[in-house]
Image (spheres, rainbow, N blue to C red):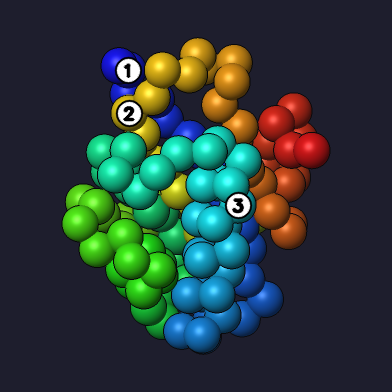
Amino acid sequence: MKVRGIRGAITVKEDTPQEVLEATKELLFKIKEENEFAVEDIASILFTVTSDVRSIFPAQAARMIGWDKVPLLCFQEIEVPGALPKCIRVLVHINTEKSQEEIRHIYLREAKKLRQDLSS
């Protein structure tokens, strides 16, 4: 079995705990749905946020949906001029037999601009 990374991102309109948590849950559910894995298959998850998202850790959303045994870490993105604001990014590491070509990376809302080649 291999460890594969699944990338994803979503934006929020406002930096409020409720909006950050809801957006993060939406992103995690979509990643799980599109890639068809069990929570037990998750090795770890890394979250990053832009500097304008600081009301709550997005990892708390994973805990809220029952992913409480998964190792989680949150980081702040480097501040690059002109970068997409109010963005939550995620890298989910899963144990899987899928090839890299079978992995579905998920970009939602304004974050679709980040990887138009991967956004459907």
**Label 3–label 2 contact, CB within 8 A:** no
Mark 2 vs mark 1: which is more N-terminal?
Answer: 1
Q: Amino acid at mark 2?
A: Asn
Q: Quadrant of the N terminus?
A: top left
Q: Secondary structure at mark 3?
A: helix
Out of 63 and 112, give the one closest to the viewer.
63
Q: Position of residue 84 (x, y in %)?
A: 64, 55
Q: Residues within 10 Å of mark 3 (few under 14, many from 20)?
A: some
What's the residue at 51%, 85% (across, down)? 18
Q: Which residue is mark 3?
A: 30
What's the residue at 60%, 52% (across, down)? 30
Q: Position of residue 53 (x, y in %)?
A: 47, 72
Asked if residue 21 shows in the view, the reply is yes
Q: Amino acid at mark 3?
A: Lys
Q: Secondary structure at mark 2?
A: strand
Marking on residue 16: none
Asked if residue 52 shows in the view, the reply is no
Q: Quadrant of the C terminus?
A: top right
Q: Residues within 10 Å of mark 1 (few under 14, many from 20)?
A: few
Q: Position of residue 3 (x, y in %)?
A: 32, 24
Q: Amino acid at mark 1?
A: Lys
Q: Is residue 84 left or right of residue 76?
A: right
Q: Which residue is mark 1?
A: 2
Q: Which residue is mark 2?
A: 95
